[in-house]
């Protein structure tokens, strides 16, 4: 895979006034399909991981998934990396039932809910084994299975990169991001994963929020912004950021990926994508908040972007953004 270098300083980890660690990475900011600011090499190849889910959902809607009526809550969960809370699981099961399937046909990696209260509730019920339904990607996989049923495609091998579903998703991701797909890997959930660039990811998110109402791109963006709790979950930075900034669309991905786009009446829409080079998730919220500040986008509540550094069980520092965007003329 292409070297991520050169990257740029994104955030400092400060303990008792001392910079203990630094996170480096890449940031792209796009407006009207052109990059207006960046940090690091935004043309470097990377895997966007679960930040691709909205694009995968657009591809599936284009491939016939849209022929079945779906509530906006269901669309939000299809694009989610959910925490396994009751509403998440109920919605996934409802998606499967609508096309005559059950959770036993999900092939994403079995797991436990991300949410600690949801995990505790399962233990209280005597459920101690991992299951695919609990995994954060089960919403995406339910959409994949539903798309296969609607098209009369096989469901046993829907994760095969040569399957018609995955071939269509690959082509549409390339269209949406404008990136040539150079690498195909296996994501953590077992689905095919397609490479791209930070710039292409930002461009794709901008396209979601600027799409004409009624298009599949707009349906996905509107559903996610209408139901932030279903896109992630309670206590998650994704959910909190969308609550704090009306008009903001946010999605996370593993290995330090964060993508967002903002649209508001009278303000030019903007898309951004962040890749933390060391794969850490702890710096991403502070960096996104710094990008929003640079763009003068109001943030009503900032606790989601304030990541504490602890010592002896108390707060002794914080992760500070050190982002220095290079603005293009």
Image: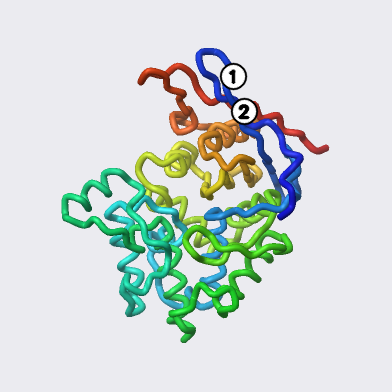
Q: What residue sits right under mark 2 in the picture? A: 22
Point out residue 300 in the picture as x, y percentages from the top left corner. Answer: 47, 31
* Distance Cα–Cα, label 2 vs label 1: 7 Å
Task: Please report contact status of discs 2 and 1: CB closer than 8 Å, yes or no.
Answer: yes
Asked where in the image residue 92 lies, by quadrant, the reply is bottom left
Give SS at disc 2. strand
Q: Quadrant of the C terminus?
A: top right
Element carrying mark 1: strand
Q: Position of residue 77 (x, y in %)?
A: 40, 59
> 146 and 245: which one is in front?
146
- Label number found at residue 19: 1
Q: Residues within 10 Å of mark 1 (few under 14, many from 20)?
A: some
Q: Is residue 201 above or below residue 313?
A: below
Is residue 223 positioned above or below 5 on the image?
below
Query: How many neighbours does mark 2 have within 10 angstroms: few (below 14), some (14-19), or many (20 or more)?
Result: some
Give the farthest residue toward the right: 329
Q: What residue appears at the point 33 percent right and 46 percent down from the top-left corner?
A: 115
Left or right of 68: which side holds 14? right
Q: Is residue 199 above or below residue 284?
A: below
Residue 106 figure quarter: bottom left
Find the residue positioned furthest to the left: 125
Q: Which quarter of the rendering shows the N terminus?
A: bottom right
**Residue 64, image x and y in percent?**
51, 78
- Residue 123: x and y in percent read 20, 51
Residue 265's tag is: none
The residue at 59%/57% (across/down) is 208
Q: Is residue 37 visible?
A: no
Residue 4 visible, this orientation: yes
């Amino acid at each position: 895979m292409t070297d991520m270098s050169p990257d740029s300083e994104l955030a400092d980890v400060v303990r008792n006034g001392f910079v203990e660690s630094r996170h480096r990475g890449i940031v792209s900011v796009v407006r009207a399909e052109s990059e207006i600011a960046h940090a690091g090499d935004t043309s470097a190849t990377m895997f966007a991981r679960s930040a691709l889910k909205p694009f995968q959902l657009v591809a599936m809607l284009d491939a016939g998934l849209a022929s079945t009526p779906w509530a906006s809550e269901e669309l939000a969960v299809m694009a989610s990396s959910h925490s396994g809370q009751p509403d998440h699981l109920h919605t996934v099961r409802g998606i499967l039932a609508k096309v005559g399937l059950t959770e036993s046909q999900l092939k994403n990696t079995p797991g436990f809910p991300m949410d600690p209260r949801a995990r505790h509730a399962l233990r209280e019920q005597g459920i101690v084994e991992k299951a695919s339904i609990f995994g954060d990607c089960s919403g995406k996989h339910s959409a994949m299975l539903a798309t296969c049923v609607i098209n009369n495609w096989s469901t046993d091998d829907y994760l095969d990169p040569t399957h018609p579903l995955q071939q269509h998703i690959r082509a549409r991701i390339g269209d949406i991001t404008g990136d040539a797909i150079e690498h195909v890997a296996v994501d953590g959930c077992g689905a095919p994963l397609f490479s791209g660039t930070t710039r292409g990811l930002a461009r794709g998110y901008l396209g979601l929020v600027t799409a004409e109402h009624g298009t599949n791109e707009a349906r996905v963006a509107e559903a996610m912004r209408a139901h932030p709790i279903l896109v992630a979950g309670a206590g998650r930075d994704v959910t909190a950021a969308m609550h704090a900034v009306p008009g903001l669309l946010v999605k996370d991905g593993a290995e330090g990926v964060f993508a967002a786009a903002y649209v508001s009446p009278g303000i030019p829409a903007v898309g951004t994508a962040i890749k933390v080079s060391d794969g850490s998730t702890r710096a991403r919220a502070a960096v996104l908040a710094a990008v929003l500040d640079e763009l003068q986008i109001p943030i009503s509540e900032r606790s989601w972007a304030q990541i504490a550094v602890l010592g002896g069980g108390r707060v002794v520092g914080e992760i500070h953004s050190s982002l220095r965007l290079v603005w293009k003329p």
